[in-house]
Amino acid sequence: MVRFEGVSMRYGRGHETLRDIGFSLAPGSFHFLTGASGAGKSSLLKLIYLAHRASRGRVELFGRDVNLVPGADLPFLRRRIGVVFQEFRLLEHLSVFDNAGLPLRIAGRKPDTYRDDVAELLQWVGLGDRMHALPATLSGGEKQRLAIARAVVDRPDILLADEPTGNVDPAMSLRLLRLFVELNRLGTTVLIATHDEELVARAGRPVLHLEHGRMVDTGEAR
Ligand SMILES: Nc1ncnc2c1ncn2[C@@H]1O[C@H](COP(=O)(O)OP(=O)(O)OP(=O)(O)O)[C@@H](O)[C@H]1O
């Protein structure tokens, strides 16, 4: 599903943020990505969701070398990936319901065909009574849960989540973990970047660990 071989990346002309990274995510797997602040977790996720290119090495996504994918096909690959961004990236002029349903709208579906599904998902993440609110009126934790709902609503082939439980209490963190596990059970390959050690311990899933831009654990020994 995802495969890195000897991958390095840098921002602009700076030093290499990631160095010689090699790992793979099998279809239907569930991994955490850990490492100190600045170790390169968000940067690695950017390479997977094609927001940044590797400066060296080979990145394969859905069995294809991303360097060989024609530019016109990239949006189709990206659409198969749900992303929970650390800074949420909600659309401020759209309601909670419309933000959550956006991937379905973009896929060409009419709101009437997904109203109940989106309402149920929002209920699950504790936003059932905020469906008509605008993002600006939500708390940090509520925004985070909305970002998660939007990332999972179209059952992506891959879910990438950058610190998805950073703003919620332990009970909600466990609830969100159940949502990720359920999505994974339905076939989505999941990769969650986190500092939340309790979440990692409780989930009991393999861990990819970064230190200073190098992957020191590829999750295979556990
Ligand atoms: N857009 C950018 N331009 C230049 N340098 C960047 C950019 N984004 C990140 N970096 C640098 O790359 C390194 C890795 O950052 P990254 O955000 O990937 O780490 P992280 O492990 O996700 O950290 P955190 O846990 O704090 O989110 C850091 O030194 C950071 O300053």
Image: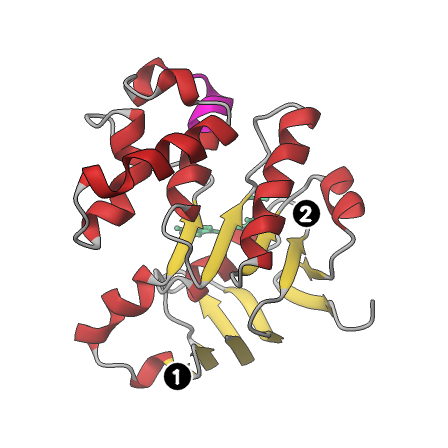
Point out the image quarter for the C terminus: bottom right
Give whichever of 181, 94 is nearer the camera: 181
Q: Secondary structure at mark 2?
A: loop
Q: Residues within 10 Å of mark 1 (few under 14, many from 20)?
A: some
Q: CA distance from mark 2 to mark 1?
A: 30 Å
Apparent side of residue 137 relative to residue 43 in the rendered image (left or right): left
- Tell me where the magenta segment starts and ends, as one range: 138-144
Can you tell which mark lies on residue 123?
none
Q: Amino acid at mark 2?
A: Ala
Determine the image quadrant of residue 184. bottom right
What SS does tag 1 mark? strand
Amino acid type of the residue that numbered disc 1 sits on in the rendered structure: Arg
For the stretch drawn in magenta, the main secondary structure is helix
Q: Kindly tell me whether mark 1's CB lies below 8 Å from ligand 1.
A: no
Residue 81, horizontal then vertical, whole percent = 39, 60
Q: Position of residue 118 (x, y in %)?
A: 35, 36
* Residue marked by disc 2: 36
10 Å crowding of disc 2: few (<14), some (14-19), many (20+) = few
- Does residue 143 sit above or below 34 in this rendering? above
Residue found at x 28% / y 18%: 132
Would the CB of label 2 be found within 8 Å of ligand 1?
yes
x, y percentage for residue 212? 65, 59
Q: Position of residue 71 (x, y in %)?
A: 20, 75
Identify the image quadrant of residue 24.
bottom right
Indicate which disc, 2 or 1, sits on the residue closer to the N terminus. Answer: 2
- Look at 37% across and 39% down and name the residue there: 117
Residue 142 sits inside the magenta stretch? yes
The residue singled out by tag 1 in the image is 64
Observer able to see residue 87: no
At 39% from the left and 84% from the top, the residue drawn is 65
Whether the magenta-drawn stretch holds residue 116 is answered as no
Left or right: residue 57 versus residue 131 is right
